[in-house]
Image (spheres, grey):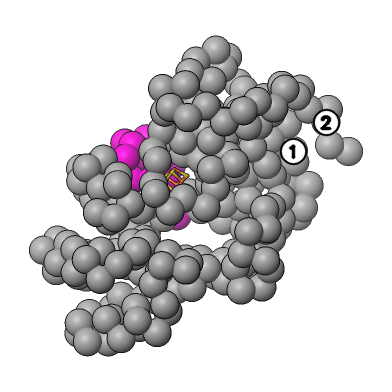
Amino acid sequence: MMSELKTIPLMEVPPEVAHRVALLRDLPPGELFIHEIYQSVQGESTFAGLPCVFVRTAVCDSRCKWCDTPHAFAQGERMSRASVLEKALYFGSPLVEITGGEPLLQPDVFPLMTELCDMGKTVLLETSGAHDLSEVDRRVHTIMDLKCPDSGESHRNRWANLACLKPTDQIKFVIASRNDWNWTASVIREHRLDERFQCLVSCVFDAVKPVELADWLLESGLHRVRMQLQMHKYIWDPNKRGV
Ligand code: SF4
């Protein structure tokens, strides 16, 4: 049985980042503000195609222009960490992804990931790359964005995080234009990212055609960089939530 959830009323999405982050201010230790927990097929990363439980935290302090989860900016339920764990385990999946919103805004995400690892789960963390990764359990597979210029958030890339990543971790670039691709290729070369980590590139749905990104990748000679499509957007309606 899953435990009862303490629900707080849904509200209009506050437009400003400060208003969103304020929703976390009164969150007591031991609680998380969760948008949804569900099972689906992992649509991205080197784990793509595997059944996976997604724990989507509410609230993000970034504002990427092409964000496909703005519904998670301010709406959710307060849940005890024990309840989140119980619901994540309910599906029986060995693969659990903590995503958002921005998970690292909530302190209880760190012990939650450790508890899942202790239970033998393969834990993925998807994060914007704007927050310190140094306290993330080393058993977690981190998938960190480096935001490209067209996202409007590239000034928040926390470059010091590169020193916290492991060779098995993944860096994701979401490409919205040729300009974004040129920036990505140059950053990968400058920091030798393709030799140090798993590098993933994907296109903003409806902004760059997969065939364009494939051509740019092949022309570049970046042979270790992996192109990916958001598989769930091809399986289900691209606007469908909870998949
Ligand atoms: S970091 Fe992720 S959740 Fe936040 S605005 Fe950007 S794409 Fe959306």
Lower sequence index among marks 2 and 1: 2
Q: Is residue 196 visible?
A: no
Q: Are marks 2 and 1 in contact (CB under 8 Å)?
A: yes
Image: magenta residue range: 126-141
Q: Position of residue 99 (x, y in %)?
A: 53, 46
Q: Which mark is residue 86?
A: 1
Instruction: Give the class, few, some or many, for how many residues have Cα within 10 Å of label 2's Cα (few <14, many ≥20).
Output: few
The residue positioned 68% from the left and 35% from the top of the image is: 84
Residue sitting at the far left: 190
What residue type is disc 2 on?
Answer: Ser
Give residue 86's quadrant in the image: top right
What residue type is disc 1 on?
Answer: Glu
Looking at the rendered image, the quarter that the N terminus falls into is top right
Q: Which residue is mark 2?
A: 3
The residue positioned 52% from the left and 52% from the top of the image is: 68
Q: Position of residue 100 (x, y in %)?
A: 53, 43
> Which residue is nearer to you in this view: 77 or 66?
66
The residue positioned 33% from the left and 51% from the top of the image is: 151
The residue positioned 32% from the left and 40% from the top of the image is: 130
Give residue 112's quadrant in the image: top right
Q: CA distance from mark 2 to mark 1?
A: 8 Å
